[in-house]
Image (cartoon, rainbow, N blue to C red):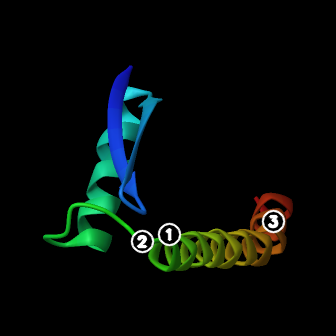
Amino acid sequence: MKKVTISVASKDYTITLEDAFAEAFLRDMELFLGKKKGLDTKELLSAFVQKSYDFYAQECQMQALVPKIEQVLREG
């Protein structure tokens, strides 16, 4: 487990994440933050909406693949 500290609206929050996820999370935060050290409330909301949309888009893609996979399995 790895402890990660995030600054939101000038307040620090420490969270504990599984090691592999912590690395991915920190990469995402670095892409989002750039050189900044923390987020304001609007940026946090924007990041949450973007991640939610990314998840939604992935879900749609997976649902579109299900019929294709089922067809391949029936033909195989």
Give the amino acid at mark 1.
Answer: Leu
8, 71: nearer the viewer: 8
Mark whose residue sits in front, 1 or 2: 2
- Name which quarter of the figure residue 73 lies in: bottom right
Determine the residue located farthest toward the left in the rendered image.
35
Q: Residue at x 76, y 74 (%)?
A: 68
Q: Is residue 32 left or right of residue 16?
A: left
60, 70: nearer the viewer: 60
Q: Which residue is mark 1?
A: 44
Mark whose residue sits in front, 3 or 2: 2
Q: Which residue is mark 3?
A: 75
Do labels 1 and 3 touch, CB within 8 Å? Answer: no
* On screen, residue 57 above or below 1: below
Q: Residue at x 61, y 77 (%)?
A: 49
Q: Residue at x 33, y 36 (%)?
A: 4
Mark whose residue sits in front, 1 or 3: 1
64, 38: nearer the viewer: 38
Determine the residue located farthest toward the top in the rendered image.
1
User: Residue 40 shows which numbered tag?
Assistant: 2
- Name which quarter of the figure residue 29 lies in: bottom left
CA gap, disc 1 and disc 2: 6 Å
Circle 3 sits in a helix, a strand or a loop, which is it? helix
Give the amino acid at mark 3.
Answer: Glu
x%, y% of residue 74?
86, 61
Q: Residue at x 19, y 69 (%)?
A: 36
Q: Is residue 18 left or right of residue 61?
A: left
Do labels 3 and 2 touch, CB within 8 Å? Answer: no
CA gap, disc 3 and disc 2: 53 Å
Give the amino acid at mark 2.
Answer: Asp
Do labels 1 and 2 touch, CB within 8 Å? Answer: yes
